[in-house]
Image: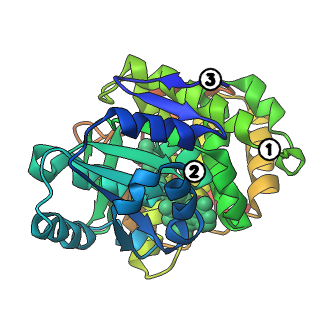
Amino acid sequence: MANIKSNGYTLYFGNNALLSLNSFLIKRNYSRCFILCDENSLQHCLPHVVIACPQLGKADIIEVESGEQNKSMETCTNIWEIFLEQKADKNTLLINLGGGVISDLGGFMASVFKRGIPFIHIPTSLLAMADACLGGKNGIDFMGIKNSIGTIARPEAVFVCPPFLNTLDEHHVLNGWVEVFKMALIADKKMWNALSDITQVGDPSAFIFRSLELKNNIVLKDPLDNAQRKVLNFGHSLGHAIESLVMDAGEDILHGAAVCAGMILESHIAMQKKFITAKDYTEIKTRLIRTFGPMKTIPFDKNELLEKLGQDKKNKAGTYRFSLLKKIGACAYDVEVNQKQIFKAIEAYNKA
Ligand SMILES: NC(=O)c1ccc[n+]([C@@H]2O[C@H](COP(=O)([O-])OP(=O)(O)OC[C@H]3O[C@@H](n4cnc5c(N)ncnc54)[C@H](O)[C@@H]3O)[C@@H](O)[C@H]2O)c1
């Protein structure tokens, strides 16, 4: 496994990624450094980072409480206040050390503070390593809508160090695998076949790396998300709507669980449109349920779901546009989907 060259920055991958970070920092002359983390990355990952990069012993640590509910404007405001009080300047570096919540939040805060200060991602969850750390998308949730405020801004570099996964709990490991499955479904049938039993996967590094390679190939062709990059959103139109509704109800749901439900529903729609066969749909549904647990019914009102779906960024002129599988390993984007098809998929999901 090598490093990955993305759109103007390098992703350093492997057990020695923190040593690459040390060399990277020595060559740069940042005026100061803040490290953003949550209580888990602070406890489990920060000590390793400081040992590998002694100069970060002087960095200012900003800790936010873990959880999607903190990917919010309120958190940003609090941290921008700290930046201003501490006189952070244009040459101040922000290191985002944590899962996807930390990288989305920190990337967004850095990309707009003083019209943009440099930032680095050190992903520590499987989801952040395999997906969120690459591609330059940053953002927060606003007024109950996932990722409704954000930027596309590139980090200075990304450092992926798989041994950080040793302390991640099983629940969140499974959550991360969902995005790896998504990458396989949209871009690599061979990887989908290789993922038939993840309990047999000892070291996930090769799958993380392959997911990043596949994502990078797509992002390089369409960095600003105007065309084929939308395939990365497979499962996310309905997945994000479900995630937002569950959060509105004050309950917790993992991003991966919502996306998993979204992938099953959107595969049903692909089958209705005859993009994929009934056999493929059954294979996808069966594999996802076997791996990620039995399906929960979608409990809320269909109109509430449509309301949330109406906020999806891929919609055009009031019509719903989804990214739908053409077959296992290939995905179409900007496909118009109607309410009847969505309701039919939900009914099938709730019956199963
Ligand atoms: N920008 C993108 O391209 C992109 C892509 C996919 C998902 N996302 C976003 O990512 C977020 C979800 O990311 P996530 O699942 O990593 O959530 P998360 O950041 O909340 O991390 C999950 C949990 O794991 C803990 N954790 C992280 N690393 C750990 C470690 N090494 N040891 C022990 N505990 C650790 C965290 O503290 C947290 O409790 C969502 O907000 C989603 O929208 C962004």
278 vs 92: above or below: above
Return the residue found at the far right: 200
Mark found first going from the N terminus, 1 or 2: 2
Where is the C terminus found, in terms of image quarters?
A: bottom right
Mark nearest the camera among 3 and 1 is 3
Q: Residue at the spot x=22%, y=38% of the render?
A: 317
Q: Quadrant of residue 318?
A: top left
Residue 318 visible in rendering: yes
Near-viewer residue (48 or 341)? 48
Q: Quadrant of residue 143?
A: bottom left
Say which element carries label 3. loop
Disc with the residue nearer the chain's start (3 vs 1)? 3
- Cβ(mark 3) to ligand 1 < 8 Å? no
The image shows residue 273 at horizontal and vertical percentages of 57, 31
Mark 1, Cα crowd under 10 Å, few <14 / some 14-19 / many 20+, is few
Badge 1 element: loop
Q: Quadrant of residue 79?
A: bottom left
Amino acid at the residue labelled 2: Leu
Q: Residue at x 43, y 65 (%)?
A: 37
Label placed on residue 203 = 1
Above-or-below relation of 169 to 106: below
Name the residue: 58% across, 42% down: 130
Q: Is residue 333 left or right of residue 294?
A: left
User: Where does residue 14 sit, x and y in percent of width and height?
Assistant: 64, 36
Gap in angstroms between the C-alphas marked 3 and 1: 16 Å
List the residue tagged with mark 3: 2
**Label 2 sits on residue:** 127
